[in-house]
Amino acid sequence: MTPRRRALLRLGLSFVLLLALLSWFDGREVLNRLARMDLRWAAPALLLSVLQILLLAWRWRFTAARLGLHMPYRLALREYYLGVFLNQLLPGGVLGDVSRAWRHARSTARARTAVHAVVLERILLQSVMLIVALVSLAALPLPWSEGALWVLALLVLMLASVGLLRTFRNRLQWLGSAAAELARDARSAFLPGTTLVLQLASAFLFVLANLVVFVAAARSLGSTLPLSTLLPLIAPVLLAMMLPVTVAGWGLREAAAALLWGLSGLSATEGIAIAVTYGLLFLLAALPGAWPLLFGNLSLAQPQPAIGSGDQARSSTSNKRSFPSGK
């Protein structure tokens, strides 16, 4: 299947899922809830969504620096914002990350290391989201056995990981088979223990921020569900939207919300409306990423020598290039 057909298929899947959900459930009620959105909850949620992107840009810059690739935070933020914006528009939800990896790779002689920085950063986030989703699924009073929930969650992780890795492999043919090098870069990115703690803490902080945004989205629509009921529902929905099979998770996120709300004895229509609100808030937060496309200079700075660290010290000086470290 050609890339264009895959893109059209994912776009069509998002459209069909959303249309089916609005047809099966009370689509008019979903729209009415959105029209009555309380900005006193929506505005702080939007601000927190922006802060999440600031944190993600820092995490990428930190991971790349651990691999000996240094860049100013302002440039990392611009590139991350552009990637997030593209993820919201392009089918699959990961092509913005592919673009970010490719653009970074073009600016350094150590192209594979630049790709590894993006892959490792995203894999850790998905792993932390999986952990939180597993705990949440175990806490939900669903009519499934606990064993089935674990199997389902593991299947979702496998699909998400395979989809992400296949996307990178298909879009970046020169990546090749570099498992050993990826493992070596993973040790540099996540070790020693103090570095791992910082990586995990920032990833859990991002997931926590997502939970808060989702709660705020629910409150902005007038949902009165207690936190003890609402919180366990959120992480599995967010994990489902990470599957690279639709456009930015649209349709899949709402279907997961309808399923979990319905299985929990709650209003599936409410779940769909909250999921749509969350998606709209993050889309608005990502809009500044359009600035480089519309008005900015998309060319990256010329590669400059960078000082390696850890395992990267074994690379020759002539191969160590990265963004300039100035502000």
Image (tube, rainbow, N blue to C red):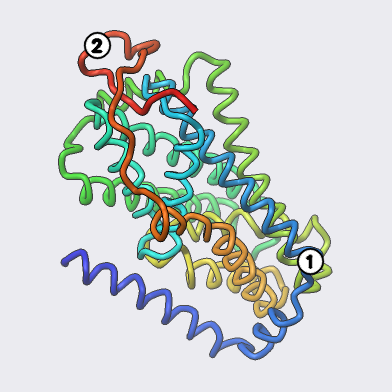
Decide which of 146, 120 is in the foreground and name it: 120
Residue 197: x and y in percent read 59, 23
Is residue 232 in sight in this rendering? no
Decide which of 68, 175 is in the foreground and name it: 68
Residue of label 1: 219
Q: Is residue 241 above or below residue 319?
A: below
Left or right: 292, with 168 as reference point: right
Decide which of 63, 18 is in the foreground and name it: 63
Q: Quadrant of the N terminus?
A: bottom left
Q: Is residue 12 above or below residue 59?
A: below
Left or right: 154, with 203 as reference point: left
Residue of label 2: 317
- Amino acid tagged 1: Arg
The answer to whether mark 2 and mark 1 are in CB contact below 8 A is: no
Q: Residue at x 24, y 31 (%)?
A: 111
* Image quadrant assignment for residue 33: bottom right
